[in-house]
Image (cartoon, rainbow, N blue to C red):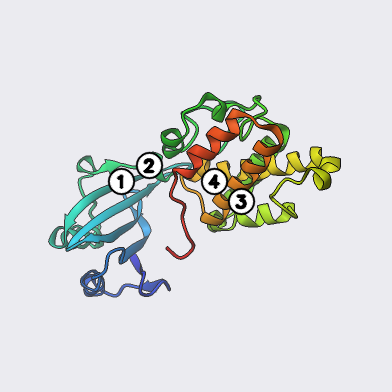
Amino acid sequence: MKFSIITNRNEKETNVKNFDNIENELHNCKKTDDFIIINNTPAIDNAIYLQAILTGKNKFTLEIRLEYENDFSQYGIEEASKSSCLEIFRNYFEGHLPDLNQWEDITKYVKQHYYKTEVGLNQETVHPSFNYYFKSDFYYSISEFYSPFGNDAGFDAMMEAESFLKNDDANNFYLIQLIEEINIESYDYDEKRDNENLHFLVHDHNAIVAIGFTNLKVNGFIMQDVKEKTLSSLRFLNQVQNHENYQTMMEDLNKIEAENYGE
């Protein structure tokens, strides 16, 4: 059995020679959000890593992932003491899993939710956080024009963004690239300047809105720069078309705290 370790203090993966290495790193978790991840080869009863993050004074949240041929499960437990954390990691290092019946199955929160033609778009095929924030039926429509995915530009952009995300997990942090490629000159509507090309501008802004909501649909979060561009495009579309769905989308999206790079 081979183990390696990653921490927020040293994100370069290094081999673990003995449990003392793990114990020392756990003791070095002193600030909130300090973390330690133990990877192992081969899997231990399908488990491929165990991680802990410091969430309070000597309190840790632990997560463990089990991978299968075409799927995975992830479990978590909160408010674990340092002594409990050490015991769980020691047992894991010795090849024994904790009793996962005592842990919460958090798979649905960490799994990415991609569109499947045979299933369609509904509350069961999006991230649980998406359901929490977006209650209106139009969010789940692929035919309602005034919605993130119901117009041609929006649906195509969703599929392109999902393909981009599937290609590499790290692309969650680079969705802004897809928006920048659309090359919007101005997010402020100007009747004299924009009316001649208004059809194309509406198409492009619909695409940007879809990219932002795809970030939320797939992952349950949105990056700050993507959120800002999504809101700007919604404001443009509302200026041009003045539809209540745009107003609802802006109101709902503004309730979400976006993620920032490096946090």
Q: Is residue 132 left or right of residue 78?
A: right
Q: Secondary structure at mark 2?
A: helix
Q: Position of residue 92 (x, y in %)?
A: 24, 58
Q: Earlier in the sequence, mark 3 or mark 1?
A: 1
Residue at numbered disc 3: 229
Residue at numbered disc 4: 215
Comparing 110 with 220, the one in front is 220
Q: Quadrant of the C terminus?
A: bottom left
Disc on res. 75: 1
- Are discs 1 and 4 less than 8 Å apart at CB? no
Residue 202, quarter of picture: top right
Q: Secondary structure at mark 1?
A: strand
Q: Earlier in the sequence, mark 4 or mark 3?
A: 4
* Gap in angstroms between the C-alphas marked 4 and 3: 13 Å
Q: Position of residue 112 (x, y in %)?
A: 49, 43
- Are discs 1 and 2 less than 8 Å apart at CB? yes
Q: Earlier in the sequence, mark 2 or mark 4?
A: 2
Q: Secondary structure at mark 3?
A: helix
Q: Position of residue 122 (x, y in %)?
A: 51, 27
Disc on res. 107: 2
Asked if residue 122 shows in the view, the reply is yes
Q: Is residue 115 left or right of residue 42?
A: right
Residue 238, quarter of picture: top right
